[in-house]
Amino acid sequence: MTTQGIVIANSVGETSQSAGGRQKMNIVVIGHVDHGKSTLIGRLLADTGSLPQGKLESVQAQCLRNARPFEYAFLLDALKDEQAQGITIDSARCFFKSARRDYIIIDAPGHVEFLRNMISGAARAEAALLVIDAKEGVQENSRRHGCLLGLLGIRQVAVCVNKMDLVGYDKGVFETIVAEYSEFLRQVRIEPVGFIPIAAMEGVNIVARGPQIPWYDGPAVLEIVDRFQKEPPPLDKPLRLPVQDVYKFTEAGDERRIIAGRIETGSVEVGDEVIFLPSLKRSTVASVEEFHGSPPQRAEAGLSTGLTLSTQVYVRPGELLCKVGQEPAKVAGKFRASILWLGRAPMIQGKRYKMKLGSARVSVWLTAIQSVLDAGTLTRETGRQQVERHEVAECVLETLKTVACDAAADIPQTGRFVIIDNYEIAGGGIILEAMADDSCLIDRQVAQRDHAWDRSAIAPELRTSRYNQRATLVLITGPAGVGKARLAKALEERLFSRGKAVYYLGLSNALGGEAGLNDSTERDEFLRRIGEVAHLMTDAGLILIAAVSDLDDEELKIIRTLNSPGRLLVINVGESRFARTEPDMELSSALEVEAGLSALEQLLQSRNFLPEYYL
């Protein structure tokens, strides 16, 4: 038995074939609590001879010692204390096999775990068995689970109407459930491959048809599982490799950067020209790396691998590597999506959440709810301001920075996402389409801010005259460890000594003492705060100086937009992270501070930010 209704079968980090060359397939068994999912799997394990020798007998003996009736669901419970409580607390792996292929089964405790596994890549179900209790009938959770399968793009679904023995194997009961649930599945775009009347506890119609149901002449559960079609490796699709991390080894003068990640679709080989999205940086694959082996020339979908590039480019984890000449992923900050919300608190418009899409982590906002499906009444509501727990909504999501993705209908692997609220997975869904970004989130936020702003009556020209300077944000960027903050502080001191109204905005000042910059969504918030503080201080007529490591084009755009109509000077020290931006000044990381100060003073003078200051 499971607490909330999920049993999943998957292959975690394994190939599509067993060691002996037999095919493996990933399935999911799903349904309302106590409708018999674990009993069904237990029966499959026992009746296919897939249990370890003596396992069945030992569980039966334990039940006898404890004076409790034996249940096939106990075969899945990994811990004795779980059996004592009669529930499944944690995940457990087990296996069964048929004459055709092998299956790996994971018994998991609820929807959130299933959603996390499915979308993060730990479980890639290719087909599903959905269990409904014949006596209880279709429950609201049965519909929710059907919605979940639809969201995850699982189209091979067979429905097992269980506990037929409790309704006397009544054909009419079975046909009523078939009619009701078929209509629901059509609404979530699923065409079931069949409905099977079963009695899992009695073993009826599990591995073979039983005489108890003479009016049914279709396949048993094992037969229909073996009829599911194995998905071929997605080699024919365009290359998609979410960048998980970038490694740099310095031993013996090795300057290579190794781009690491799991290839979701397509293939890559030495000599391919590749592009990283959304940064648009390009290079050519110099090598395909492999631990403890000679480097291969090629890597394909399903493999975790590392790549080196002929021309080193700076990319961050979260980018999506595609192949030049193939259909690229979409780059957008606005999406139409379908979401299943599981959070305790509703998902509300205007609140900041975190989205995990592939290896990307970005801040995201719900900006419009187009419709909400009520799983109980099967009606769709419009005009809603929030999505309640267990509801499915079609909505519009917007991110602070653009991300690379695909519509789930085209490439499911890069079209699935989860939403995190207060450090917990609160929902998940699929991208229906990337929308045109004519009016992006950050532009609207600035417009709303400026509309509500009660501007000072003191004109900017008066402040320029009083301070004898023009206000601007001097943004010093470049890799970590090149002396940006030291240069920024020295510039503040130099200008202050000249009587200028100047302020150095340190990292801790901008964050208010917060940590967490290793998290990309916290960096988003950090950048937003820099832009807003810069807008305030430049509006007050100050020269503001800030140092930010590894600033890229997208992040600079955020700061520039938030600081508007304030002016901005971009100074890059050392290796540039920009692909499209031309900094106002490039400085060598080897340059002495005094030489750097002289160059910056000359820049400020030439741009007329220090109109009466002469060297």
Image (tube, rainbow, N blue to C red):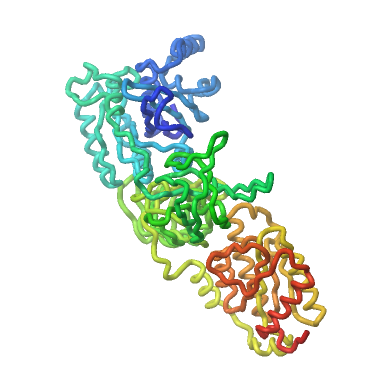
| Direction from residue 570 to residue 615 in the image, left or right | right
| Direction from residue 174 to residue 252 in the image, left or right | right
In which quadrant of the rendered view does residue 252 lie?
Answer: top right
Residue 8 position, x and y percent, is 42, 32
In the displayed structure, would residue 256 be above or below residue 15?
A: below
- Judge whether residue 565 can be spotted in this image: yes
Quick one: quadrant of the N terminus?
Answer: top left
- Judge whether residue 341 can be spotted in this image: no
Quick one: quadrant of the C terminus?
Answer: bottom right
| Direction from residue 277 to residue 189 in the image, left or right | left
In which quadrant of the rendered view does residue 506 lie?
Answer: bottom right
Q: Residue at x 30, y 47 (%)?
A: 378
Residue 530 position, x and y percent, is 64, 67
Residue 537 position, x and y percent, is 67, 76
Residue placed most toward the observer, 487 or 29: 487
- Direction right: furthest residue: 497
Q: Residue at x 52, y 62 (%)?
A: 400
Q: Residue at x 55, y 51 (%)?
A: 317
In the displayed structure, would residue 478 be above or below residue 163?
A: below
| Direction from residue 97 to residue 308 in the image, left or right | right
